Amino acid sequence: GNSVTQMEGPVTLSEEAFLTINCTYTATGYPSLFWYVQYPGEGLQLLLKATKADDKGSNKGFEATYRKETTSFHLEKGSVQVSDSAVYFCALRGGTSYGKLTFGQGTILTVHP
Amino acid sequence: GAVVSQHPSWVICKSGTSVKIECRSLDFQATTMFWYRQFPKQSLMLMATSNEGSKATYEQGVEKDKFLINHASLTLSTLTVTSAHPEDSSFYICSALGPWGANTGELFFGEGSRLTVL
């Protein structure tokens, strides 16, 4: 079956540091890949997505590239801010059921001034 | 943007009682909603798909008589945990397929509801 593995957190960084959160997946076929972010007290929000190999998703300075050869979708940001502190979830969707997302366990990111 | 709200955000109940959690789409009509369950430090697990006006579709291993789902209107789906036991304590999250439906497949999530069964 499908599975997603994220690097374990928590991750603690200073403001303006470089961020990488690793995500690898196992899936049959050609899944779509997502990063969701959950800010304190709020629901999950879609951060970025990629639907096919070599696609790069980007939003709010975050980027992730769909690498089929390494089955990875690592999240990166060149310079984090305190406001980026949140929980980040990597997820994949296989098939045509839009709700059937397979999530990673989430990575807590804390950014200090 | 599309907003989904859950209520209550936190509930404590005694073992054997039933608890209802509501999921509302505030500014759009959601024909399809989804219910997830999240254990501490674990990923979200899809429990069921809720379609307005029809019976929910449950994932394998989820007891439909234990977790009753009703989607009676285009803006409201409810999850009722019947005869709750401590092992049902968890974080329950709903999501709704956005107003553009299958065109984008984008999901909008509620804030989650934490259930603690004593």
Image (spheres, rainbow, N blue to C red):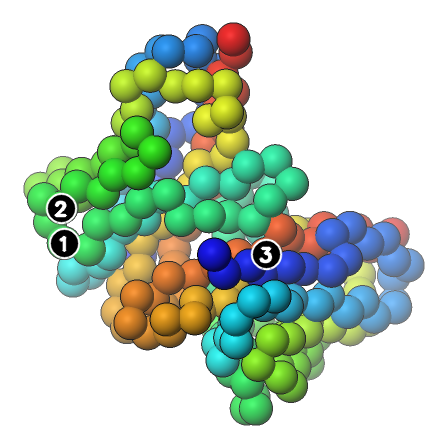
| Frontmost residue, B1 versus A101 | B1
The residue labelled by disc 3 is B110
In the image as oriented, which residue stretches furthest toward the right? B14
On the question of residue B91 being in view, the answer is yes
**At which x and y percent is residue B42?**
52, 43
Quadrant that contains the N terminus of chain A:
bottom left
The residue labelled by disc 2 is A55
Identity of the amino acid at label 1?
Lys
Spatial distance from mark 1 to mark 2, Cα to Cα?
Answer: 6 Å
Picture residue at 30% right of the left edge, 38% below the top: A59
Which chain does the residue under circle 1 lie in? A
Mark 3 vs 1: CB contact within 8 A = no
The residue labelled by disc 1 is A52
Spatial distance from mark 3 to mark 2, Cα to Cα?
Answer: 28 Å
**At which x and y percent is residue A54?**
9, 44
Spatial distance from mark 3 to mark 1, Cα to Cα?
Answer: 28 Å
